[in-house]
Structures are given as structure tokens and as C-alpha cells.
Amino acid sequence: MGDLANHFGDDASLEPEDEKTILDFLVQYSAEKSTKEASYKILKSQENKDIIAITQTTFWKNEHKSIPKEVFFKKDVKSKANCKACHSDIEKGLIEDDKIKNISSFM
């Protein structure tokens, strides 16, 4: 949020009130304040590094190491950042094992 004019190579600048609303939401629901086990593990796996992509954390890499790399490039998945492709409840902050889509459906 600190440099939206250069957000991964794009200008994602917002009106000040919109930026504040989003920042307040991010702070309120950050991993540091979550009681979810996965949030704790993801945060801990950052090892005090300035990692901004969950897919670069040790926890994420360990949890996804058995998934063939080509799955992340399938039409229905598109990238490692598309959590919803496999985690149907991700928008609720849930990544429970029993809610994960079977990767064979992408093969």
C-alpha cells in the first residue's frame, strides 16, 4: 500500500479515502491479528523477511511441494496466486484440508 503508483509495475493509485479504507481493512484482518492456525504458520515462515507474496513463504512452499508445477499453469488455475482455484473457502480466510479441491481435476 506504500507505493501504489508502482504496484508490481502498474499504477494502482487510489483516491485517499479509498486507500485509507483498504489499508484499515488490511491492518484489521492481518495475519498478526488472526487466530487462524494457517495465518500463524504463514507469518512465522516469513522469518522476518520482507515477503509480500504468500507463495514465497516457506509454509506455502512446503504445503504445495507435492503439486506438480504444471498444475499452476492449467487454464482453471492460471497461477500460484489463484488460491480460489483449489481452496473454495479462501475468501472466508479458510484453507481447511476437507475444503481443498482434488488436484486430479486439473490434470
Image (spheres, rainbow, N blue to C red):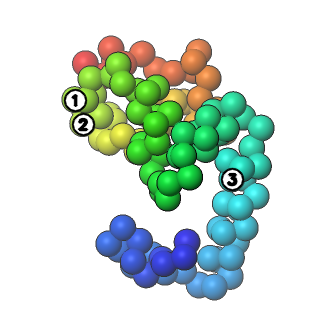
- Marks 1/2: CA–CA distance: 5 Å
Q: Quick check: marks 1 and 3 in contact, CB under 8 Å?
A: no
The N terminus sits in image quarter: bottom right
Q: Which residue is mark 3?
A: 30
Q: Is residue 69 left or right of residue 59?
A: left
Q: Is residue 9 left or right of residue 94?
A: left
Label disc, if present, on residue 70 of the rendered structure: 1
* Tag 2: amino acid: Phe
Residue situated in front as seen by the camera: 20 or 64: 64
Q: Is residue 56 left or right of residue 23?
A: left
Secondary structure under the numbered disc 1 in the rendered image: helix
Label 2: few (<14), some (14–19) or many (≥20) C-alpha neighbours in 10 Å: few
Q: Residue at x 65, y 68 (%)?
A: 22
Label disc, if present, on residue 10 of the rendered structure: none
In which quarter of the view is residue 96 placed?
top right
Q: Which residue is mark 2?
A: 73
Q: Residue at x 32, y 42 (%)?
A: 79
* Tag 3: amino acid: Ser
Relative to 49, does residue 87 appear above or below in the rendering?
above
